[in-house]
Amino acid sequence: MFVPRKILEEKLKQLLAEDVGQGDVTTAAIVPERQTVDASIIAKESGTVAGIEEILILAEALGLEGEAYISDGGKIERGQAFLKVSGDAQTILSAERMMLNLLCRMSGIATATKRLVEKLQEARMVTKVAATRKSAPGLLYFDKKAVLLGGGDPHRLHLDDTILIKDNHITVVGSVEAAVKKAKQNASFTKKIEVEVTNVADALTAAKAGTDIIMLDNFSPKQVKQAVETFKKAGFFGKVLLEASGGITEATLVEYASAGVDVLSLGELTHSVRALDISLEVTRVC
Amino acid sequence: MFVPRKILEEKLKQLLAEDVGQGDVTTAAIVPERQTVDASIIAKESGTVAGIEEILILAEALGLEGEAYISDGGKIERGQAFLKVSGDAQTILSAERMMLNLLCRMSGIATATKRLVEKLQEARMVTKVAATRKSAPGLLYFDKKAVLLGGGDPHRLHLDDTILIKDNHITVVGSVEAAVKKAKQNASFTKKIEVEVTNVADALTAAKAGTDIIMLDNFSPKQVKQAVETFKKAGFFGKVLLEASGGITEATLVEYASAGVDVLSLGELTHSVRALDISLEVTRVC
Amino acid sequence: MFVPRKILEEKLKQLLAEDVGQGDVTTAAIVPERQTVDASIIAKESGTVAGIEEILILAEALGLEGEAYISDGGKIERGQAFLKVSGDAQTILSAERMMLNLLCRMSGIATATKRLVEKLQEARMVTKVAATRKSAPGLLYFDKKAVLLGGGDPHRLHLDDTILIKDNHITVVGSVEAAVKKAKQNASFTKKIEVEVTNVADALTAAKAGTDIIMLDNFSPKQVKQAVETFKKAGFFGKVLLEASGGITEATLVEYASAGVDVLSLGELTHSVRALDISLEVTRVC
Amino acid sequence: MFVPRKILEEKLKQLLAEDVGQGDVTTAAIVPERQTVDASIIAKESGTVAGIEEILILAEALGLEGEAYISDGGKIERGQAFLKVSGDAQTILSAERMMLNLLCRMSGIATATKRLVEKLQEARMVTKVAATRKSAPGLLYFDKKAVLLGGGDPHRLHLDDTILIKDNHITVVGSVEAAVKKAKQNASFTKKIEVEVTNVADALTAAKAGTDIIMLDNFSPKQVKQAVETFKKAGFFGKVLLEASGGITEATLVEYASAGVDVLSLGELTHSVRALDISLEVTRVC
Amino acid sequence: MFVPRKILEEKLKQLLAEDVGQGDVTTAAIVPERQTVDASIIAKESGTVAGIEEILILAEALGLEGEAYISDGGKIERGQAFLKVSGDAQTILSAERMMLNLLCRMSGIATATKRLVEKLQEARMVTKVAATRKSAPGLLYFDKKAVLLGGGDPHRLHLDDTILIKDNHITVVGSVEAAVKKAKQNASFTKKIEVEVTNVADALTAAKAGTDIIMLDNFSPKQVKQAVETFKKAGFFGKVLLEASGGITEATLVEYASAGVDVLSLGELTHSVRALDISLEVTRVC
Amino acid sequence: MFVPRKILEEKLKQLLAEDVGQGDVTTAAIVPERQTVDASIIAKESGTVAGIEEILILAEALGLEGEAYISDGGKIERGQAFLKVSGDAQTILSAERMMLNLLCRMSGIATATKRLVEKLQEARMVTKVAATRKSAPGLLYFDKKAVLLGGGDPHRLHLDDTILIKDNHITVVGSVEAAVKKAKQNASFTKKIEVEVTNVADALTAAKAGTDIIMLDNFSPKQVKQAVETFKKAGFFGKVLLEASGGITEATLVEYASAGVDVLSLGELTHSVRALDISLEVTRVC
């Protein structure tokens, strides 16, 4: 998910412009022009940080100097000052909230993802943790990037990038088999085809029809295990990827992974983000 | 926060366009053209709904028919089908996720807000529950509207709409008194002036300097009570609004309110949203 | 009304892009590439300048060097060269008209505002001169900023920033009292509430209902005086702001101010601007 | 200057969106949803109207019904209700100011233009009244269209549409002759070439070099007459258009025209607009 | 590549707006307002049509009526009137060129693609004809859609949708093997991985490393055959897709296909388009 | 067609942003961060180059260093490395295709134009070669600029820049004479008027009516000669420009020119572009 800095800069400036509106009246009223300050960005709780690149790009775009003491994806501890922004006081104070809103959200996502990823690592599992497209509207890029920085797999980005046949598609087309067949026929050879199924029989049908990835929707760990075994018997295991999705929690994560799927995807990584608590403090007024 | 429907429509179409990218390849590959379907939007858990207006506007903008069985701000029960969308299958399936992403987030915000508001109502308190500017970047309008629909106060929108002097402003200017004085001098007479303070003495100073609203930042309920009493003695109570912010939880909400402030504002209403679980199901293929 | 320079730069570049269209054919046909020139921006009449920050930002954004010999809000005399722009000749000549169009309009607004403000200062009155929302569509930011630089109050910016109940709102709601009551009930505690009234009785009603600012619409100076006296008697004077609007001219300004209102607002400051005469002259071809 | 309605609609919606910001808080607070009203747009002074097409397009785009009792370019009398807008009260009240701002500005331009045009007609002159590019930034389309509706000539639109060699171009290139020669060589055969000159000798040089239009800059009527006579003698009169610009006022207009030029162009038609006084009144609440 | 009509409409209106500029001066000068006409869109040469959906969407968006007598992807014969557009004359004449520009380009692409596809069909080959990303900047969506309508495969859309490792990537990373290994490690499981190779040995290396698709770059048909045989021996044939690209012409197409690859991709399908000759004729003036 | 660099930069960044989508997944997966490379842009065939300014502007905008060894409009030979781009490897590889797509298209147009222009020069003719508005939608600026760099005339840009009365306009208005008469009456004096005619009689009518340029549509060289002679007899030759358009090929070009017209315009210069073969090669990995 590399975007040239200057392209990303445009998106960040738009988000800031929207936040500012016709002008920051507080800053205009009380902060002197041409006043220079240093500000520290400080973790108020520990976690995995994401959004540092964004803050540095935006700071530079605004004519400020930014310096990071840690890289995106690194761990920050409560109390740690991990970013410094220096320059025009009016500019920093006007951009403060928007910068933090992005940083806290992205870091919240990365932190939650990392926790799950580490849980699997501790259990010595190689199962992947993946996001879904249940992100905040307009913020998909940032949400997915945060998942990546937390060690997760971003899954699909746009609707244009992987064939993912879901329940409603199947309802319209009639059957899993018919849907996969149409997809194989019509989709570009450059795309993988994934199908969401609700039972083991459909999973097998989908695999036989040539699906690349099968999403086991709302399966219990036990049902997952059953699917894995069926695939082993049928010779699809290891060839067709298995992804479990729906109802997976931190508590059941290892159990699901142990059941043998390749990927565990969780909507709440991006739809129910708990922001990491981070604040900005002016540390020096020059 | 009324925006003419056709203006709001543009913003919604942009969010959808961004989500679709170069085209929905799944829908294109397997869903027939000119196929008409009915779809129900169904609550998978109970809560307060927000975003119905947005779904109806977007549906209409896309040439679909939308019908709501409940109004924004109403309560939905688990299992309740509260919205119906009918029309072109390709269009509905391409817009499904973006629609749900908005609806689930807004309803999540409204639900959390409502829960707090009702807690205060049950305790027979008239204290207001307010949001902060800690929203998701780019989604401030939708986040604030959801707070409103949940019975909360949206607080400031843009940086252009109320003078709010925070800790970093005071650091730059030197003192609460100097900051308020400058604000009174330079700000438009059409704006209220709010100051964030960290102790009772500063609160009193701010009130004397002519501040309209005082935000007690990270005060304990006990400290809030002390501030209220000091204000009563000084004759500012009821004239200068008192807002407590920072560290307020569902558990301490009533205690804070009982301490006598006018407003309780909570960043997590918008920065740490738990999406309400809502799904779309195709119910009829014509 | 502080907007980070790089955000303002985007708006200025858009205005220029719109002006240029597919390319400046004159410049392309006759001005050599890589030719450097110096140009002076010169007052053809005296006045108060506004727009210098905009010219400097745009010049820098275009890769030119800009230097100002005066600050925004300062007085310029006929014949005074107050700004210098140096750099690529093609760029300067293509941007000349758009730069001047903005500078002449903003300076025209600042000059007219300043004249009124000084008139009141000479009469030793502290009454504020304010703008209205009767600006040129799309130019509200620049128009309001020019009023500020002329010493005036910008009044509301967006429709989102202060409650202002006007005649048509009252027609729809039924009465001044009902309108204010609804506003008090529904508006955020962060907003002031202003009401436009057409007679003293309504002004009093509005004040009793808790309005923060009352706009006396099309009152004669005598009627204004009457309102002021009524407010003094009723104890509202000094607590509820009084703004007179409609029919105020340079000739009647002091009379209105003497009648005791806090603010005089004039639509013509922004809707009927007389541009200040300013031109750009290439002074050196390198 | 025909722009397909639906393209113009986009520009108008953008201007409105910018005006509204995050939402009209007044309307939201006090105007009921789904309330229908009729509103009349009424001339508070007499003049030539322009902007009716824009209001009707925007009204329709917003889901309102608009009806005009007069066409663009027609005369309106003080007190005349010449436009009616009906529909959703919240929408009308939110769009009122932006609609009037455009209508008042355009009508102000058309009125001033018409007055000059009629002055020449009364004097039985066929001289054209033209605008310049001294318009409000971002509003060039609307400003030029208003000039057209007032009976004037819009002159150049973008910088891409006619070669217009001005003083600064000549300074850079060295001489009128060199500038015209380069323009003839490099410009597309589809463009006319116009040159601004400051004396009769340069006017003659320009004509000999093959210029299509010559702008006599800041000539007195006497100097204009001298130029005309020189052109008659040299055989250029009637072949090369003569345009006088700079220092022309309503008082000297006929004198300038009598001097024999083809076109009189006036910057103040668009840079120093006096808005026509027009208001909107809700006439019926359904 | 399905995009909801109303989203596509926005893009089409933007292209038209850009084409019109400040207004169609010809239409404004000579075509009466409110004149209704019928216009036929007629093939001046035979081919495969693409762009009908776009014309119908834009026509409807502009308030015109459009009717198609053939579907996208169908064959049109020289002289055939295959589309009718009716409505406002000014609107049709202003949009004519932009509509034709899109239709002629898309149909040119579809026609060329179809010719190659049919050549292979006649030779009874199932090899796919694919496009590359060598499209016109900004027109990728339309170019790819036209390839699809001509029976081809659109290949990648954005840079975000398939991993495609090209020569320069390999130069930077060091070797085909290292590049594929990194891709397998870092890319989302939802993406296929394709590698461009310049010899058979690298093709084999890539296949062993787990690549999904291998692009044989500038291979002669003989070299392609050799690669196919190597893959058959190594057991990769039919499992790893083979795509030949570079230097393939209409003349060598069947020879390449016979060599056994799955896909033939040709840059000239989109980078060197010959527009299909199509014109619009006003057939009735009402 | 001069556009200030920083304005052009915006357009180029938008084209790139559209191409990248949510991020370049290949580059992200395998190219290391902060890796610096040099890349050469190399002609794979000889031709006239156009687009160098665009590549340099975009490179600089992206923080890369660009260096050109030739100017726009110059000749490049097969194998010649004429541009060098250095800097961040991820950025260069993400922008490579979009840069080449623009450069190859523009150079293809310039090359084709130049070939025709040189053909006429060799035949010692001064006839101009011109483009039409049959460009790729959205790329008109780049297409026209390439024509200019190839020595051609860009003809009209926007619909706002010259009156061009075509067949359909005449159908609507009734006759060539009526159309020209209306145009003379209504169009700005700053515009030339051009009419498309299908026979010599209409050409004469148009000239008599005061047209500036006459486009002889689909005339054979013989018919062109006849028109020229008619014009000579009638005294219009040399005063009214004659442009032949339609059916002109490289083979018939000189014959058409010899027939005596001033301009030959060819749609295929921009509607049927053959891209010049140019590639980018990473030459050094630092």
Image: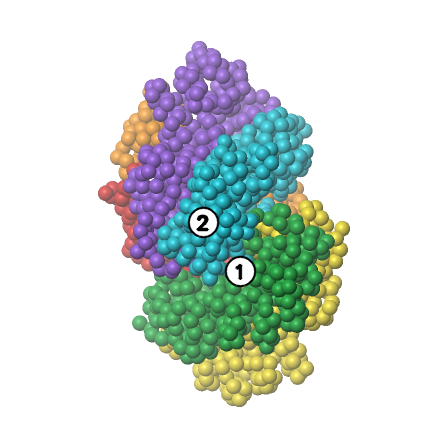
Chain colours: A red, B orange, C purple, D cyan, E yellow, F green
Residue at mark 2: chain: D
Q: Is residue E229 left or right of residue A168?
A: left
Point out the image quarter for the N terminus of chain E: bottom right
> Residue, x 32% and y 24% (percent of image)?
B208
Answer yes or no: do the residues labelled 2 and 1 have beta carbons within 8 Å? no
Which residue lies most toward the top here? C233
Q: Position of residue D218 (x, y in %)?
A: 43, 41
In the rendered view, tell whether residue A197 sits above or below residue B116: below
Q: Which mark is residue B181?
A: none
Residue at the spot of label 2: D203
Let me know if residue C162 appears in the view.
no
Q: Foreground: D55 or B225?
A: D55
> Residue, x 35% and y 25% (percent of image)?
C118
> Residue, x 47% and y 45% (percent of image)?
D227
Q: Closer to the N terminus: mark 2 or mark 1?
A: 1
Residue at the spot of label 1: D189
In the rendered view, tell whether residue F265 sits above or below residue B168: below
Find the distance from the CA under tag 2 to the CA under tag 1: 22 Å
Q: Foreground: B197 or F43?
A: F43
